[in-house]
């Protein structure tokens, strides 16, 4: 039916032009599909390799952290009760004076305006 319908309505040149246009669209679609699959495969392979490297680095970092914690415990002397009380007092003082560094409550962080720079050394630290 379609050949009979289109065959009478379109000239031979028009049918050829439509055939070429359909061929270009078909080839373009096939190219895009193949290129998409190729690039997708490359991205997946790259992400898999990155993931393996990241897991390896994370494992190394955890092992180093475990070793560093053990080393610190071995090297650091045990605190006396007096030193422990002094440390608690110091931490309470720091929490009171530096609320943005040591918030008292969850979500209590309120950034303050930056201090003006000192004219003497320009660092802002006095």
Image (tube, rainbow, N blue to C red):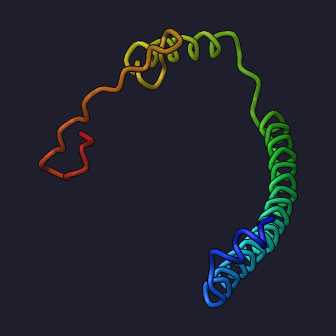
In the depicted structure, whether residue 88 falls above or below residue 18: above
**Residue at image coords 78%, 73%:** 3
Query: Against 77, is 106 above or below?
Result: above
Q: Position of residue 54 (x, y in %)?
A: 80, 55
Seen in the image, is 120 located left or right of residue 57?
A: left
Between 36 and 126, which is closer to the camera in this rendering?
36
The answer to whether 80 appears left or right of 55 in the picture is left
Classify residue 39 as left or right of residue 103.
right
Q: Residue furthest bottom?
A: 13
Q: Give the x, y percent position of residue 8.
A: 68, 76
Q: Position of residue 77 (x, y in %)?
A: 75, 29
Q: Position of residue 28 (x, y in %)?
A: 70, 77
Residue pictured at 77% horizontal, 38% vertical: 72
Q: Residue at x 39, y 21 (%)?
A: 98
Considering the image in quadrants, where does the N terminus appear? bottom right
Question: Does 114 sit left or right of 107 as displayed?
Answer: left
Identify which residue is drawn at 83% across, 44% down.
62
């Amino acid at each position: 039916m379609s050949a009979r319908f289109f065959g009478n309505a379109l000239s031979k040149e028009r049918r050829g032009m439509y055939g070429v246009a359909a061929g270009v669209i078909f080839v373009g679609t096939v190219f895009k599909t193949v290129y998409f699959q190729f690039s997708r495969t490359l991205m997946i392979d790259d992400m898999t390799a990155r993931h393996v490297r990241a897991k390896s680095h994370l494992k190394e970092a955890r092992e180093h952290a475990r070793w560093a914690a053990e080393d610190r415990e071995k090297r650091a002397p045990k605190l006396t009760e007096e030193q422990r009380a002094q440390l608690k007092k110091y931490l309470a003082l720091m929490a009171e004076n530096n609320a943005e560094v040591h918030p008292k409550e969850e979500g209590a962080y309120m950034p303050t305006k930056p201090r003006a720079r000192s004219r003497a050394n320009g660092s802002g630290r006095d």
